[in-house]
Each structure stands twice: as structure tokens, then as C-alpha cells.
Amino acid sequence: MMPTLLVLPALIMFAVSFVKNDKAKFWLPASSFLILLPIVKLFLLPKPYALIGNYLVADRLDTYVLLVSSIVGIGVTLALLTLDKHVKVSQKAYRRFYRFFAIFWIGLTLSILSNHMGLYWIGLELATLSTVYMIKTNHTPAAHKEAWNYMIVGAIAISLVLFGIILMYASAKPILGEEAMRFDLLLAHADKIPSPFLFEMGFAIATLGMFVKMGFFPMNLWLANIERASFYPVAALFSGILESAVIIGFFRFSQIAEKVNYAHLFGFVFVYTLLTIFIVSFLIFRAKDFMRLFSLSGVEHMALIALFWVSGGTFAALLHFGAHAFLKPALFLSTGVLESNGKYRIAGALRGYHGKKGQLFWVLVSLFLLAIISLPPSPMFFSELYGFGAMIDTAKQSHHMLAMIGAVLLLLILLSVIFYRFVAVYQSMKYEGKTEEKKVYGSELAALMLFALCLIALLLPVSIDYLHTIGQG
Amino acid sequence: MGVDFLIGLFLATLITALFTSRLYRLIMWYSLNSLMLGILALLIGQELGDTAMLITGVATILIKAIGIPYLLKYLSQKFHFVRQIQPEVKVHYAIILIPAILVFTFYLAEPITHMIHGNANYVAVSISSLFLSLLLMMEHKNVAPKIIGFLSMENALFLLGITATDGMPMLVELGIFFDLLMAIVVINLLFHKEEVKS
């Protein structure tokens, strides 16, 4: 019953996508809220809770990730109602977008809740393929080219993940048999894996695939280009839901790799994420449009989450993840309005709003922009404090304290570059350029309000306690 | 012995595909590559007494060796694809590059082969097939050969699954097949705009 309820909103969306009545789409935001009922129930149930045998199991971590990604799904369905007001889209393409969004949602729910490496991969692949068509909904040569790019690069990334999974499975099969696909059993028997080298090699390859999918080094610009070419809700879905499913895979694999050889795991992820942030910070500095700016900032934040996670800052990583998952889709969805007068018109983008809706819109967008660069009281401010603290704590247990302090200082410099760029963009949006009237619709404002409320909820003591309990085991 | 011969043919069909300059010929080499994979799964499955692998072998032959090549040919006729597909990597460079990839992957897989019981060298063949499929994707500008490269990559991963792990769980293999079909649906939708352009 519970698994059916969890995919019910997506199934309704899939069914509605075949209805040719244009008014049918108004049912979708209401039906998407239905997903909150089984998730609330999941929070109340004892963990781990088996949804379908040992294949789909809800624990504290995936219940949290599922809640975050579902809220993003709700927000996107709300904002989708007015997509045709901002961009040119035919009703047929609109309906098809919903159809593939539904498949995407089902795939990622499967990935997030899976306790099985194979199922995790299947869900991710399903979501990757369904995204291809969502990119192509925008009937421009650039979107068409990027859809193929996504198909090919996405397929390579996802194949690397499967390649890694096969090697990890092979490493543990002698002791666990076919059950070596299960995350919980792998974690419990990680120290008994007969071929740790094989496991580590599999982990490195799978992680490389996941990092490529999130736009890490050396594929820093591929996601930004795709998000630029497609309609803005696609970027919101990428940053809020797809990356949630990818990062939960990284969390799961790295929990096992930590037990196999922590020094190797930390070294690999540390160097990789630092290199990614180094390159991305300069790309952000040169970004000339909102989409690329937000997309590259997303890569930076995902790299920080991975870094905090392997440094033992589970709480910091999860808080950062939650805040990013709400902030980034909110910013991406607001680009529909911000770019009303052209893609590259940053100057004056926050001016020209009238009425209560307009006023509320620019205030919210301003707050989101300042929150994404970790200005207090943004949850990201606290998560970064805890994250850097965790990095120093890790260094205390090794002989690399000076190197870690150096790395933290380098990170702070790079984050300052990003901070400077965002503040400059904000000032340009608010104080430069001509004032041109822009229209804000109720549904997109409702989506932004939802994300703002969720951000506040992240800082409530009950949320903080919950995130701490995930870290404790 | 039979398995060694089939693995050799699997690799040979992929290498030949890299030199092919005609689309239908490329589809045929992909079909033969999949056929070898399917027969391999049947042979290894019979050796291990693994019913799941036998089912997978039959499904591979039906879906990958017959169904997908037929569908690809149908799509290419429907959307009038250019059938002359000249690889970007010239033949004399490819002759050097392909053995280099094979030697490199055997060297790369050397530490792993000690850890895998049974068909240890086949893992190296799987990894080299993966790199060769990537090369197939890279050496063509046209979309259709890129898709065949992607499908060959799936075959290479499948071979790795069969040889390195003595078969993946049935559920995973069926899921991979399902995803492959979904990929074909998406590719079909993308083709709608591609038409004569490519």
C-alpha cells in the first residue's frame, strides 16, 4: 500500500498527461501534495521500515531525502502551471513534459528508497532517460543538441555507475552471494569483503560516474549548458530531485567505502571536490546569465556536500543538502520571471515588480540569492560552519593538520570569489539597468513561498534533532 | 573452449564495427555482437546451472540481437538517415589505437583478475569492450552510430556482469532490459526532429 501511495501523484500525473483538456493540469499540484501523507506516515514508523521486502527500505536518511525531493516535486508542479506564460510551448509538448516528469519522479523515488544497488541504478537510468525528452520540450536547435548531449554524456556517466556497481558486487559476492547487492548487508560486512581493492576500484568508478552526472571536474559546464538550453523547470528538477537521488547513492556507497579504507575514500573525494570547487568558482565569476550562474553554483554546493560527508560532518552535509535542494529550485523557477526581458539581462532583473505579488517575489528572490551564498541566518551558513569544523576534526586524528588548514583557507578564498560574484549580480539586479515591468503569477509565488517555509523549517529544533540522529547512526 | 571462442567473436564484432562506414552494416555488427553475448550467457548459464542467466541469454538474443537492430533499421528508414557514416578516426590511426586500448585494458585489469575466480581474463575483455564502445561513440559525428556505441556499451557492461560476477541478479538484468527499451522510446522521440539533418 505504502509504495503505491508514494508513486500515486506521479501515476496521476502520467494519466492526466493523456487528457487533452487544458484545465486538467490544475489537478496536478493538488494531487502532488498527496505524496506528503505517506511520507509523514514514514517518518512516524520505526526505522528501518521495509516497503517491499529488502529491496525498498525506508531508513532515516532516505526518508529525509525523499521528503526534500518530494517538496521540490510539488513546487515544480505549482510553477509548471504558468510555464506557457513565460515560454513558447505547444499543448502537446506540455502534456509530454508532464508524462516524462512523472516517469522521472517514479524513477527517482525508486532510487532514493532502494536498498539494492541494482534497483538504485535502474531508477537513476529511468530518470536520466526521461529527462532527455524534458530537455527537448524546448523546440530550439540548442535544446535539441543538448538533449542528444545529455543522452550521450548521461549514458556514459550512468554506465560508469553500473560498471562500478558490478565490481563492488563482484567483490562481495563470495561472502554474500546475490545479497551482495544490498546496501545494508554490504555495510554490515564491509570489513569482511575478500577483495577490498576490487571494491575500492568499483567505488571509484561509480563515484566518478555520479560526479560526472552532477557536473564535477572535468564536466563542469555540461549541465550548465543543458540547463541553459532547456526550459527552467528542468533545471529545478535537476537540482532538487535528480541530484538528491545521485547524492544519496554517493552517501550509501561512501558509507561502505569508509569501512573498507577511510584514508583512500577521504583522499579521493577531498582532491576531487577541491579541484571541482577551484574550477567552478572561476566559472561562476565569469557567468553572464542566471541559468549558468545557478547551475555552476549547484556544482559548487554538491561538491561541498560530498566533502562534508566524507569528513564525517554528516549533519553539516545533510543540512547543506536540504538547504540547497530548496534554494536552488526556487532560484531556477524564479528565472522564468527574472528573464522576462531577455536571457542576458541581469541588470534591473529585480526591478519592475508591482502589487503585493510582485513585491513579495522580489523580496523572496533577494533572500534566496543572499541565502545561497551562506549569509546568516541561511541554513547554509550553519552547515558550512559545521562542515569546516568536521574537516578540522578529521585532520586532528591524522598528521595532516597544516594541510587541512591550508585546504580550508583555500576553500574560503574560493567561496569568497563566489560570494563576491553573487553580491555583484544582486546589486546589478537591484540597482542597475532600466525598470521594465514584469508579471508574477500566483502559482509560481506559491512555489517560492513553499520553498521559503521549508527553509525556515530546516532550522527548527525538531529538524536539527532529526538530522543529528541520522548522523549518529 | 566454446566460451573463449565466443568472447573472441564478441570482441571481433565490436572491432569490425569500429571500421564500418555503412549504417546497416554497423547495425548488423551490433546484432552479431549481441548474439555472441546471448550465446555466451546461455553457455555460462548452462555451465553454472543458473536458470536466471539462461533466461537472460534468451532475452538478450530476442531483444538485443533481433528486436533492437530491426527497430533501428526501421527508424533509420522512417527518418531517412544518411547511411554513409565515415568514422572521424582514420583507419591507419584506428589500427594502432585499438590494439593499444586492448593492451592498456589488460594491463589495467591485471590486479583485478587475481581477485576474480573463474573467467578472470574475460573481465579485461569486458573493460576493453567498454573503451572500444566509447571510441565508437566518439569517432562518429552522426547520431545513429553514437546510439549503437551506447548500446554496445550496455553489451560490454552485460559481459562484465556475466563474467565478473557469474551473473547479476535476475531483477537487475530485467531492469536493465526495461531501461534499454525506454532508451529506444526516447531515441525514437528525439529522431522526430533529426530526420535528414544527420
Image (tube, coloured by chain):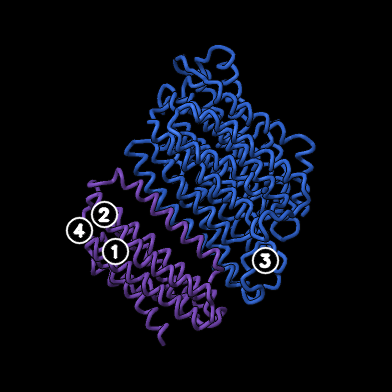
Q: Earlier in the sequence, mark 1 or mark 4?
A: 1
User: Color of chain B here?
Assistant: purple
- The disc placed on residue B27 is 1
- What color was chain A assigned in the picture? blue
In the picture, the quarter occupied by the C terminus of chain A is bottom right
Q: Nearer the viewer, residue A312 or A405?
A: A312
- Marks 2 and 3 on same chain: no
Q: Position of residue A376 (x, y in %)?
A: 69, 31
The kind of residue tagged 2 is Ser
Circles 2 and 4 on the same subunit: yes
Instruction: List the residue tagged with mark 2.
Output: B76
Amino acid at pointer 3: Leu
Label 4 crowd (10 A; few <14 / some 14-19 / many >=20): few
Same chain for the residues at labels 3 and 4, yes or no? no
**Residue indicated by mark 4:** B84
The residue marked by circle 2 belongs to what chain?
B
Residue labelled with disc 3: A186
Residue type highlighted by circle 1: Ile
- Graded by Cα atoms within 10 Å as few (under 14), some (14 to 19) or many (20 or more), the crowding at tag 1 reads many
